[in-house]
Image: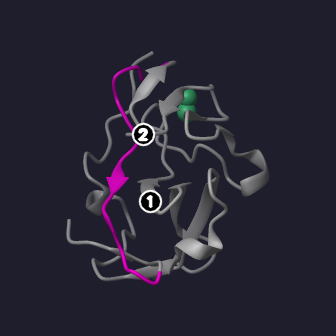
Amino acid sequence: MNSQQGPRHWSEVPRAPQAGTVIGSRDDLPDGQATLLALDTGGGVAQPFRLLLLRNGEHVSAFVNRCPHFGVPLASNQAQLIFKSQINITCNVHYARFRWSDGVCEAGECLGEGLLPIPLLIATDGQLTICQP
Ligand code: FES
């Protein structure tokens, strides 16, 4: 099955936050865990901008919580998020599997496509800020 056409860059996703948006602190993210974050960027709590934050020690990677297969969240809440720490993260709709390191699909319906990465600035105090597109 072909993947859905969709945004090719995180800034094209509806309700994408502005560069410079502070999204939290690395210290609030358990090391080795994938964490869901819902940001209210004008759509209210019913239509947040959803991110996946993957922490590896001092580093944090961010991706849009949007599977390139059907354009839906990989999981709608933290309890449903399927991941192997520092190895991969899996969509809980049709179980496409994405590499932890870069979000590229390594198995499943959207092989070779990937999650949309969001560049983060990590301050010395751990504050996480979205960078310029
Ligand atoms: S929606 Fe089909 S694998 Fe994610």
Select label 1 or label 2 by which is in front.
1
- Residue 106 sits in which quadrant? top left
Q: The N terminus appears in which quarter of the rendering?
A: top left
> Residue placed farthest to the right in the image?
79
Q: The C terminus appears in which quarter of the rendering?
A: bottom left
Residue 59 badge: 1
As drawn, 78 above or below 93: below
Name the main secondary structure of what is drawn in magenta: loop
Magenta segment: does it hold 118?
A: yes
Magenta segment: does it hold 114?
A: yes
Could you say where residue 18 lies in the image, as x and y percent from the top left? 30, 78
Apparent side of residue 39 relative to residue 64 in the rendered image (left or right): right
- Residue 20 sits in which quadrant? bottom left
Residue at horizontal 27 percent and vertical 59 percent from the top: 12
**Residue under numbered circle 2:** 101
As drawn, 23 above or below 108: below
**Any part of residue 127 in sight:** yes
- Residue 5 sits in which quadrant? top left
Could you say where residue 14 lies in the image, as x and y percent from the top left? 37, 63
Task: State which region is magenta.
Answer: 109-125
Could you say where residue 117 lies in the image, as x and y percent from the top left? 35, 51
Q: Amino acid at mark 1?
A: His
Upstream in sequence: badge 1 or badge 2: 1
Residue 75 badge: none
Please tell me whether mark 2 sits on a helix, a strand or a loop: loop
Apparent side of residue 87 relative to residue 21 in the rendered image (left or right): right
